Image (cartoon, rainbow, N blue to C red):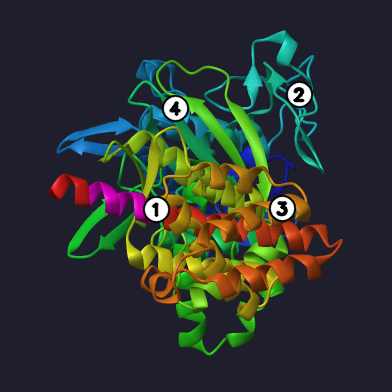
Amino acid sequence: MTTMWNLPIRHDPWLDNGLEVLAGMAEAIARQHPAVLSVRLEPDGLRLEIQQLQRFAHLLSHQIALQVENAYYIPEPGRKVLKPFVGFNQQHPKQHPELYRGKEAIEAFVQELLAEISQPSNRRSRFTCPFCGAPATEKRTLSLYPFVTKTKALGGQAVWEEAGFRGLNEYGPICAVCAFLGMLAWSDTALLYRCDIDGPQGTALLALPWPQPLDLRRLHTQKQRYRRALNPAHRRSNVQVVVRWGDREREDWPPQAFTMLLAFYEAALSRVLREIQGDGEEGLFELTALRGVIPDGWILLRIPQGRMKDITATDWFMEDAILRVLRSMIEADVLPYQGILTGIWLTLEGRRIDEETAAWREERAAAFLQNDFGGFAAGFGVRRRQMLGFYSEAVQGLHQWIQIWLEERKTMNEQELELVRRAGRTIGRIAGAQRRATILYEMERARTPSDLLGVLSDVVHRLVGMEAQEMRDQYLSLEALDRLTALIHAAGDDARRFADMKHTLFIYAGLEYAGVIRGQTAEATAR
C-alpha cells in the first residue's frame, strides 16, 4: 500500500532548514532504492510517495543515524563530542532529543512517527501546532527549537514576519513532525558556525540560510552547492581560510558573524565561478542567476555556550550592489577577507593586539556587507594610542576594493579616486611627519564641504616654504591638494558624492599616517 507524506514549508527558518535536511536524506534513499520511495521537491514543500513503509522506516533510521553524526566533532580518537553551538550539548545524554540518543531511540521514534503518518490516530490535544496546525503533543524546548524563551517579557507568538526576525516565542507545544524537523536542523552541515568566542564558556554564532522569497527547492540546490566550500570537521568553525603573507602560511577562522559571512561568500563565490567557467555557464554569473545558487539572506544567532540560555538573533539580506561588488572582486582575484583584512592589524606600543584587531576586522566586514562606506572608512583613523599595521599587498588590494565599491556607488571615477588617494597620502604624510593627529580628527569631523576645505587649507599652509624637490622627496603633492579643492567645490550639493570623497580621503590619509609613524618608531628603536 502506498503512503503519501506531504510536508509543506513552515515559513520558519529553523524548521524549513530541517525540512531541507530531510529532503536530502529522502533523495539519497530514493536514488539507491527507487522501489521504496519517490520524492518530489517543490518550492512550497516536500512530497514523499512511500511504496514500502517498513523498508523506508529502516532506511530513514539509518540515514538519520548518519546525519546526526554531523552534530559532533572528534577531539581525539575514539571520542565524539557535540559541537558547542548545539542547544543541548551540556545536557545528560538521556535528556537529548530522541534522534541523538543512539540507533535504537532513532528507530523507535521513526516507527512511531511513520505509524502516525500512515494511520492517523484519534489522539487529541488541547493545543494546535503554531507552525502547521496539527495537534501539538511535543514540548517546544531550546533543544528542539532555539527561538524560544521562558521569559514572558520576551515572549510572543509571531516570531517571523516578511520584514524578518521580530522576537522569541514562549515555550509551548508543537506537533511531532515539526519537533522532528527541529531535531534534524542541529545536524545540518550547511549551517555556518563559529564557536568559542571569548573562550569555551563564551558564545557561539550560527548562520541559517534564509533567502527570500522562500523556495525549498532553490534552498536545497543552494545548500548542495555551497556545502563543498565548508569544513565541518573543526570544533571552532566550518568557515576556514588559509592566510598567506610573505613566506608565512597559517589557518584562520573569522572571529565573528560578518567576517564569517564575508569569508564564506568569497570562498563559495570563487568555487561557483570556477565551476561556471569550467561548465561554460557564463550566464549563471549574472546577478539574478547568482542569487539562485548562493543564499542572499541569513538569520544570525548568538548562542551562549555551556548551559543553554536565551539566544539572540538578527537577520541580514545582501543588497544587489554588494553582491555585484563581491562578484567583481572575485573576478579580479581580490579576496576581501582572506586577501585584505587579514593583512591589516592593530598595534599598541608596537605590539599586535589580537582582540582589538578581531573587532576591527568585524566592523569593516559588517560595514561592507551592509553597504555602509562611511562606517567602513571610520576604522582607518587614530584610536587611543592604537596604530594600524599592514602588509603592502593588503593595501594594494584595499585600493582595488575601494575602486570597485565606489564604481558601484557611482560617486567617483578612476581618475578622481587616484586624485583623492594622492591627496590623502599627502595629508597623512604631513600629519605623521609633524605628529599632528588632530588633522585626521578634524577631517573625520568635517560635515560640510566648507569644513573639509578648511582642513585642506590648513594642510596647504603647512606646505608653504617647502622646496619643490623636498616635496617630491617626501611624496607630497600640492597639485593634488589644489585639484581636490576644485573637485570638492564641483561636488556642490551632491551630499552622497561629497561623503564618499571625504571618507575615501580619510582612508588614505589614515593609512599613510600609520605608515609614517611606524617608520619613525622603527628608526628610533634602531638607534
SS of the residue under disc 1: helix
Of circles 1 and 4, the one toward us is 1
| Tag 1 residue | 433
Circle 1 packing at 10 Å, graded few (<14), some (14-19), many (20+), is some
Q: Position of residue 204 (x, y in %)?
A: 45, 31
What amino acid type should be assigned to the residue bearing mark 2? Asn
Circle 2 packing at 10 Å, graded few (<14), some (14-19), many (20+), is few
What amino acid type should be assigned to the residue bearing mark 4? Thr
What segment is highlighted magenta in the picture? 516-522
| Tag 2 residue | 122
SS of the residue under disc 2: loop
Q: In whole angstroms, how far apart are the C-alphas of marks 3 and 1?
A: 65 Å
Asked if 440 appears above or below 502 in the picture, the reply is: above
- Magenta stretch mostly in which secondary structure? helix
Of circles 3 and 1, the one toward us is 1
Asked if 97 appears above or below 441 in the picture, the reply is: above
Circle 4 packing at 10 Å, graded few (<14), some (14-19), many (20+), is many
Q: Which mark is residue 203?
A: 4
Point out the tag, 1 or 2, that comes first from the N-terminus: 2
Answer whether labels 3 and 4 touch (C-beta < 8 Å). no
Q: Residue visible at 64% across and 16% down? A: 149
Residue 292 visible here: no
Q: Is residue 498 magenta?
A: no
Point out the tag, 3 or 2, that comes first from the N-terminus: 3
Q: In whole angstroms, how far apart are the C-alphas of marks 1 and 4?
A: 43 Å
Of circles 3 and 4, the one toward us is 4
What amino acid type should be assigned to the residue bearing mark 1? Ala
Q: In whole angstroms, how far apart are the C-alphas of marks 1 and 2?
A: 84 Å
Q: Nearer the viewer, residue 457 or 126?
A: 457
Q: In whole angstroms, how far apart are the C-alphas of marks 2 and 4?
A: 44 Å
What amino acid type should be assigned to the residue bearing mark 3? Gly
